[in-house]
Amino acid sequence: MKEIAPHHFSSEDLLKRIQGQEVEPSINQIKRILSGMHPSEVAHSIESLPPKERKFLWSLIDTQDEGEIIAELHDEIQQELISEISPEELITIIGDLELDEIVDILQILPNQKTENILSAMSQRDRQRIQEALEYPEDSAGGLMNTDIISVRPKHNLEVVMRYLRAQRELPKNTDQIFVVSRENKYLGSLPISLIVVSDPGLNVRELMETETQPLDAYLNDKDVSRLFEQNDWVSAPVIDDESRLIGRVTIDDVVDVIMEDADQNFLGMAGVAEDTFAAPARAARSRILWLSINLLTAFIASMTISLFQATIDEIVYLAILMPIVASMGGVAGTQTLTIMIRGLTLQQINQSNLKWLYKREIAVSIVNGILLSILVGGITYLWFDDLIIATLICIAMVTNLIFSAIAGIFIPIILRKFNQDPAIAGSVVVTTVTDVIGFFSFLGLATVFLV
């Protein structure tokens, strides 16, 4: 049988073979392909398979590679695979991972399984992990690694360079080392590039940088990612309540936060939070809540229509036109909502500029409302040859677009006040408001002027 060169294959090639879209390979061939792939590529392959093929592929991965691969997977798939692994085997799998990756995995496990794993570890490792587990998952402390290199300010660069050479290897993404006091309190940082080009006789105190403020361990991970983006950091120190250096956050962890946050916001807009290839029962459970909430809001909109049943019975073609008003308001409201969610996520919106943004959205809704109402009014007049109906739908459309802007601005702010994610709940609430206002304004005007 012809040998397959592993490095010629990507995750897409592997998926085609596992799913039988090309010549079906043997198990040994798949293993050889896997051995030549990067852990992130293998993780992508696992996430791109339905459950049955996913478990088959996982079973072919060497134990020594499982840790790096499982660290690359999304939480839901991590849980799915880890649930079938014994604590003893899991300790072996995660043994060589970085501290933050181990903590991420332990945080998704049941408490009893976490305790079993910790009890089987060495006292040093157990203490390090327990200290990291004290911090919330979505904080700088939850993201940090403890693989830090620190020096005292009194040392000269020659001593520092000897110390660095004595290390087996520098931790990943080491662009700077940190300067601490005798009590391990953070004082500043010393870039590696500066160490290389400076006079070895200079001491650390003369060269260290003190402008960059360290990250508080409880700082929210979204704020951490914002600071990294604004300052182009590769790494940043993390301190506890007493300003002691306890770890560092690196850019690879921040990228994971950004990707996960974007993923959650994207899925949340549709009220979905599930693995792409989740089993039907699990997918149904994850969606039923927001479908039920949407059903409730649909009944609220229907009740609004029922208030004007007599009007609709008398002028039947109102039923033909009223979805136009509600639909336009829903789309306009969602546009404003999306702008608000983006601005809130990037922390661009605050008390000082909210008033300007509110006025801008109202102005946009008035302009768009007038232009679209002229178009809709003209079509309505040509369709039904009724000037009053055409005028009423114009007024109702402008009214609904204005209210859609108001809803899109304030609903996400209100939801945040109640600790609700506007990316998940916002679209349902905004759509309900625009439907109710659209139906009420159009049918209410028709009742006043036509009945």
Image (cartoon, rainbow, N blue to C red):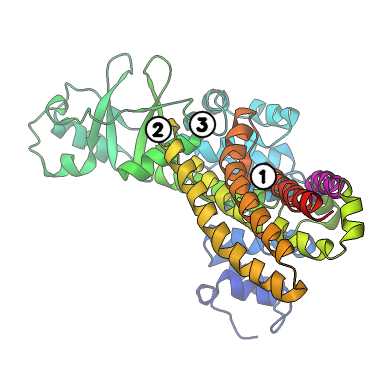
Residue under the image location 70 percent in, 57 percent down = 392
Determine which quarter of the picture holds residue 178.
top left
Residue beneath disc 1: 424
**Residue density around tag 3, few if under 14, some if 14–19, many if 20 or more, within 10 Å:** some
Q: Earlier in the sequence, mark 2 or mark 3?
A: 3
Q: Which residue is mark 2?
A: 352
Residue at (37, 38) in percent of width and height: 227
Q: Amino acid at mark 2?
A: Ser
Q: Quadrant of residue 247?
A: top left
In the rendered image, which quarter is residue 157 located in? Answer: top left
The mark that comes first in sequence, 1 or 2, is: 2
Disc 1 is placed on an element classified as helix
Kind of element beneath mark 3: loop
Q: Is 293 within the magenta?
A: yes
Tell me if residue 110 is in the magenta stretch: no
Label for residue 139?
Answer: 3
The amino acid marked with disc number 1 is Ile
